[in-house]
Amino acid sequence: MQDVNLKLCKQSYRTKEAYKSLRTNIEFCGDDVHVISITSCTPSEGKSSVAMGLAMAFSEARKRTLLVDADLRKSVLVSRYRTGAVHMGLVHYLVGQQNVEDILCKTDARNLYIAFSGPVPPNPSELMGCDRFKSFLEIARHNFDIVVVDTPPLGSVIDAAVVATQCDGTVLVIEDNAISYRFAQNVKDQLARSGCRILGAVLNKVDMSAKGQYGHYGKYYGKYYGKYYGNYGEDAATKDIAQEQAKKLKPKDVPKQAKITKAEIKKPGRVRIPSTIDDEIEVIDINKDNNTGKNED
């Protein structure tokens, strides 16, 4: 088994929560879903990033996870995430040159293993449909809790449909405002014809800014739910900064409050309390006799 280190970018809180939600939704699909394929309609929709993020989410949940790079035509996982030499890949096993344990890579992320694609073969579709790939998935199914298979875009090549027939379910990644409804429907129908179980779709690359399609709803829920629950993970940093600034304030920087003199207390009527709230309260003169209207000695 090979050892590699991953070049992982730090994810924002919102991104982490999105992958955790995706992981939870897949777990709700049933306990029989162990091998999941990820595909898209066209290239550059972010399916490889979703596959890596989903695998990381499962590994963080203490599940022994294997990420399989089955995009034999144009893999991006090696160049994007790997640091260090990877000598053996999935292609070496499919052509009968190596065993399964020789092509697996143990990463520096806990519970996460990766099988990279290897060199580009001349017949990727035939290799994906051969018996050795079926045996590879069966071995992975018995040795790992979750197997995530990154496949080529189904709208370009048929490899994803071939792989999907050997998986427990498929997730379709769709880029926001880039794919037409008819095109996405055709890709979905292609998956259905292959007999694969479609677990759902992931809408990727959504503009969450105020000018985006979903920006209004993000501001609405952030305004009304944020005051009760706060922005988890974000308010803590802001609070720490405020506390550090408060410690640096000198006594002369603190505004002085007005003092109430004894003469003002003896006067009946209304006085202003030195507070940040501009409310007025009535001060009762205890020296005044309410029955006679005269002051006692």
Image (cartoon, helix red, strand yellow):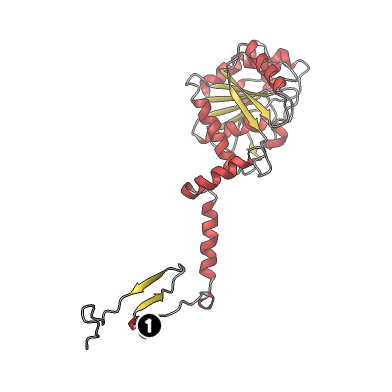
Residue that lies at the very extreme toward the bottom in this rendered image: 297
Task: Determine the residue positioned at 66% across, 44% down.
Answer: 209
- x then y, percent, for residue 149: 62, 24
Residue 97 visible in the shown view:
no
- Up/down of 174 relative to 96, above or below: below
Q: Which element carries disc 1, helix, strand or loop?
A: helix
- x then y, percent, for residue 140: 56, 21
Q: Count the marks.
A: 1
Nearer to the camera, 35 or 84: 35
Task: Residue 17: name its quadrant.
Answer: top right
Which residue is label 1 attached to? Answer: 264
- Up/down of 179 relative to 289, above or below: above
Quarter of the N terminus within the rendering:
top right
Type of amino acid at the residue the image marks with label 1: Glu
Residue that lies at the very extreme toward the right in this rendered image: 122
Task: Determine the residue positioned at 66% across, 14% down.
Answer: 189
Residue 177 visible in the shown view:
yes
Task: Residue 46: name its quadrant.
Answer: top right
Task: Residue 164: name its quadrant.
Answer: top right
Nearer to the camera, 90 or 188: 188
- x then y, percent, for residue 19: 57, 34
